[in-house]
Amino acid sequence: MTPNLSAEFLEAVHTSKPVAGYTHNFYRYPARFSPLFARAAIKAFSQPGNIIYDPFMGGGTTLVEARALGRKGIGTDISSLATFVSEAKTALLSPDDISTIRSWAAQLPNHLNLHRPPVRATSWLEAGYQRNINGRSTWPTRKLLELALAQIDELPTLEQRRFSRCVLLKTAQWALDCRTHIPTVTQFRRQFFIYLEEMLEGASSFAETVREAERQYNRGDQLVPLCINRSVIGVEADDAWSDQSAPSLVLTSPPYPGVHVLYHRWQIQGRRETPVPFWIADRRDGNGASYYTFGDRHAQNLNGYYEQIRAAFTSIAAVSGPRTIVVQMVAFSDPAWQLPRYLDTMNEAGLTEIVYPGFSDYPDGRLRRFVPNRKWYADQRGEIAASKEVVLFHRPRT
């Protein structure tokens, strides 16, 4: 790694700049790391054309940056919502796509009228995906979403439909998630069109960057990302890996031990949970919080969590090559005992820790970053243990 890349990486680790650029703001996925961090890590630990793997891809930050930098991104995630968001963020929209979406959106206000007959999403309603959004203050938003989603099939291509669902997803998250006061119908419609233009601009910028990277490295379709909706555990046996070489870089942020992160639900007034994002994305859920976090955070000694982490990183080691670098950002509710056990688990999974002296900013030789005002849908904020993340480096043990 050159001194310039080393300095860029350190700066990116400690950045407090908000998430921005390309398609990164398509959806506010919980616990996402900075695109600047992903970009710096990819540039520091890989070359154009290499494979970058994110086994817990979440909102697809790693895959977006990999594609923009001329690398092939592969991601897995157990959440179908994460897969949807990552597919939407890494897709390339053409000028014709953008023109078609704008034309579709131009006629949408005629349909977003509460006086229109309802278009009930009966199967989703019966399956519970509209839970806690049928109250006196939330039903107008629910009806707007139904009216808008009923128009999605007017768009001719999957990419256009997926993008438009993502705009609705972002607008609904703004309107409903952790909101005490729900916006009015007029405010919702206005915000939808603000997000539509912002996201089209981001998609256009991303597509332009990617096409330039494809021309520069003469890779073309070889760099199309692969988003796989499955657990990383056992991924080495997945057919998707049969024609892939080992990743040069595994870049990820796994579930944090003992830290409550609500990956799969939004919280409506009074912290009532709803699975409505899955309905908007047209993806199925049906799993509880511990399914996405490797176990109950209150479980004694977090044994279930560490068993899952061991199995996950054993599979990560299995798809890695001897020169693969594993870079992960992780936080702990109680680092004093959880970090040593975590490192022992990495060793049991077949990974050896690497300590880069130039990256050390703590006595133990590791690199940490502080996340200001962190909250995990809980009462604690700011100076909590989980607001101090550690960046760990490993490679497969030979």
Image (cartoon, helix red, strand yellow):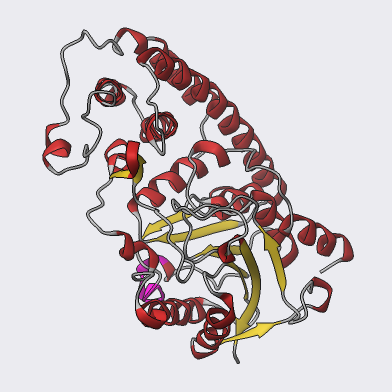
Residue 223, can we see it? no
In the rendered structure, the answer to whether residue 58 lies left or right of residue 1 reads left
What's the residue at 24%, 22% (across, down)?
A: 143
- Relative to the observer, which residue lies in front, 117 or 16? 16
What's the residue at 36%, 81% (across, down)?
A: 300
- Relative to the observer, which residue lies in front, 131 or 345? 131
Q: Position of residue 243 (x, y in %)?
A: 46, 68
- Relative to the observer, which residue lies in front, 326 or 137? 137
Image quarter hosting the C terminus: bottom right
In the figure, 68 relative to 206: above or below?
below
Q: How many marks?
A: 0
In the figure, 126 relative to 231: above or below?
above
In the figure, 365 relative to 38: above or below?
below
In the rendered structure, the answer to whether residue 348 lies left or right of residue 45 reads left
- Relative to the observer, which residue lies in front, 392 or 365? 365
Write the start and end of the magenta stretch as one range: 233-240
What is the quadrant of residue 351 in the picture?
bottom right
Dominant secondary structure, magenta: helix
